[in-house]
Image: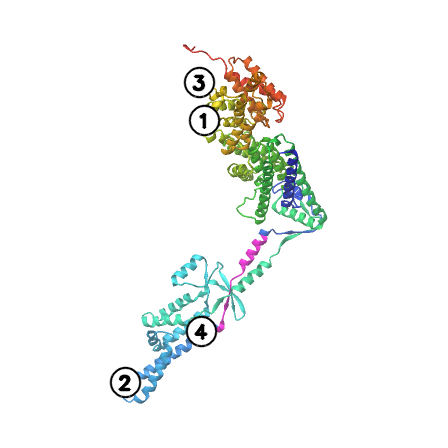
Amino acid sequence: MKKKRLKIHLIIGWLIVAATAIVLFPDKNIALQSERPHLGQVSTRTIVAPINFEVPKSEQEIEAEKTRAAEKVNAIFGFNSDETNRVSEDLKQFLHKLAQYGSLQSQINQLNASADGDSSLQPKVIQATRIYEVLKQRISTSAIKPLSQNSKARDSLLAVFNRMLQAGVSNTFIASSETAAQLYRDNYNLQEFKYIIYSKPNITLIKDNEKTTVEASNIQPLRRRIDEAFAQLQMNFPNEQGLLSAFYETLFVFMMPNVFYLEKETVASREEARNKVTLIKGMVPRGMEIVAQGAPITKEILEKIDALQRAQQKEENSKTFTAIYGNALIFVLIVTFFFLFLFYTPSRSMFKNARQLWSLIALALLQILAFWGVHHLSGSISSADISIIPENLDFMWLYPFAFAPVTATVLYDRHIGIAFTVFSSMIFGILNGYDLAAMTCAIAVTLVATAPIARMRYRVQFVYGIIAGVLAMAAAISVMYLLRNRLSLEAFYQNLIAASANIVLCYALTSVALIHLMERIFGITTVLTLMEMSDFNRPALKRISEYAPGTFHHSIQVSNLAEHVADSIGANSLLVRVMALYHDIGKTMRPEYFTENQKQGINPHNNIDPLQSVKIITGHVEQGTELANEYNIPDLVAAGIREHHGSSIIQYFYHKALENAKETGEEVKVEDYSYKGPKPQSKETAILMLADIIEATSRSMTDTSPEALADMIHKTIESRFTEGQFNECNLSIRELSKLEKSFLNSLDGTYHTRVKYPGQK
């Protein structure tokens, strides 16, 4: 990526990240939180009310009081006197007709017994028949006879019936629970019925426009009133089954509800009770001491301090309005310093395309969004006063300040991880009321938590990072408690559990999901991918071992050598190792033209022109690049394929062409006998170039003494330096000197003198 384009993308990213932070955190109250003490802390100063102000109740308190006020309101039922009179009169008239029918039947029987009653019998039969037709429309014929012939039974029935009506027959069942309602339904085999769940002992009954409080048990539904009435009648007429059956049938037909549940009135009354709840706890007059210096900060004191700050904001709108601009300026400065670091960091060479640069911008945005989510979630939980949340829990330890640093350290390197550490910790300090101690603790915790994964090789390092992070969290919480004069083991354990869960979640999101997504979306190659690529069972490596076993052995030797020397200058040794394993994959297209794969001394180059040989030799770079695309080798690794020869000259064939030219007189151009490049763009590809040449040269040496090896290594590095192969990779003279010593140490260990065994020649 050209420097100009890099600047454009960085500026656009800076604008997006800064605008996001300002939009998501416009809260002018953040700055005021720096003056707000913490619960349990010893006050460092005496606070006196400078103005008169109200102390409001919290939303939880208000809602709790409204709920209690509504619960105190009884359910309201209405006694309908008109319906009572109508139902009573209906039964009374029916019983009167039964009495008439019974009387007519007695008269008819008497006339049938006498011989002179023929003239008066017929009218009475007709009258009785008419009454009977009316009666049987309401009750069965089996019930008419016993009731019509027993006046005492009719009187008892009417008396009990009226007592039930006066007691109240409800249209709604008052159930203590859903279970009680279900039992009532099953007992009477009801499909649908009205009921309310009500646990209070009393209800309000409106009768004749007067409200009275009665026991809820006095209000019974229709079926239970019928059972009560029948039980009383059964006591009066114990052995008369036919009559009892007639009683139950008549009660079932005539008894109707006369007490009705007034749902609208009940809801309105409860809502009125809720609206009467006051919203303030009290007033604090000007000059009243809120808290004295050295006194502990209680929940009540903290509520007064918060109320004072809100009251001051209302009085000083201009000052609080400027706080918004101050808050925005702080975010702009933090984002600016972060992007300046990215632009001038030594690691900026890794961003070879816009997509990889935007991965950093996306990660910064994700960190801000994570802060925003927790910030608003903690605010909601605090205002909701959820009982399961421990009272001593400090929500600051739930902020995922290690999220982006852990991800950046794994995705990029330690330098970028530190940049995100400072960026994340500064925003964390702002969100906690510009708390310098909180910011410092966050930096320390993050640096400790990311230290085990700075040079990632194994996934178990994630576990080490979690353990280190939890221990660092314990130390940070202890420091914060000491600063706030809050020494409590219970509070310490509660916050340590929350902080540990925070660290575990950050690592889990990073290791399980985010790293893989970032790799795929932005084309980033992480150490985890590199470790997977070093597996010899990968299809590309199997191809090399199958088609070019000599090249495969050479690649392994180069990888071991390059990995060892890379550590000496702080280069990415794992990347160099993986590059070396794949750097000669292009040789698998025509393996027989390369020395390490030739058998029995057969060299096909002896039969072709030097220029043709050069085309075949240099062609393995271009062919290797094509195979890298075919096998989905990451661009970061494929760079080793393209750059490991740079633009160096193929000396053997160049000199051979010069000898031939002496006879033919043809012009020999040095560029025709050179690789097409590009030159190494990173320290890693430069190391690969040297390791490739030095390893191949060392195998052809007969004298492998330390002196001979040192001379060969020096000349190799010097020649490549003179050719300008390292001009584009920022490799210094000092680093070249370190590499020379490291190459010698490595090769000297390989070619050290061995003791000959007996019989060995």
Mark-to-mark CA distance, 2 and 3: 147 Å
Q: Position of residue 487 (x, y in %)?
A: 58, 37
Placement of 334 over or under 135, stated as above or below:
above
* Separation (CA) of disc 1 from disc 3: 17 Å
Three-letter amino acid code of the residue under disc 4: Val
Q: Are marks 4 and 3 in contact (CB under 8 Å)?
A: no
Q: Nearer the viewer, mark 4 or mark 2?
A: 4
Q: CA distance from mark 4 to mark 3?
A: 122 Å
Judging from the image, what secondary structure is the residue with disc 3 in?
Answer: loop
User: Type of residue at label 2?
Assistant: Ala
Q: CA distance from mark 1 to mark 2?
A: 131 Å
Which residue is tagged 4? 87
Q: Which residue matches tag 1?
A: 547
- Residue position marked by numbered label 3 in the rendering: 600
State which tag comes first along the sequence, 4 or 1: 4
- Asked whether residue 441 appears in the rendered view, the answer is no
Residue 203 screen position, x and y as percent: 50, 63
Give the magenta range.
61-82
Three-letter code, disc 3 = Gln
- Where does label 2 land, which residue? 113
Magenta highlight on residue 67: yes
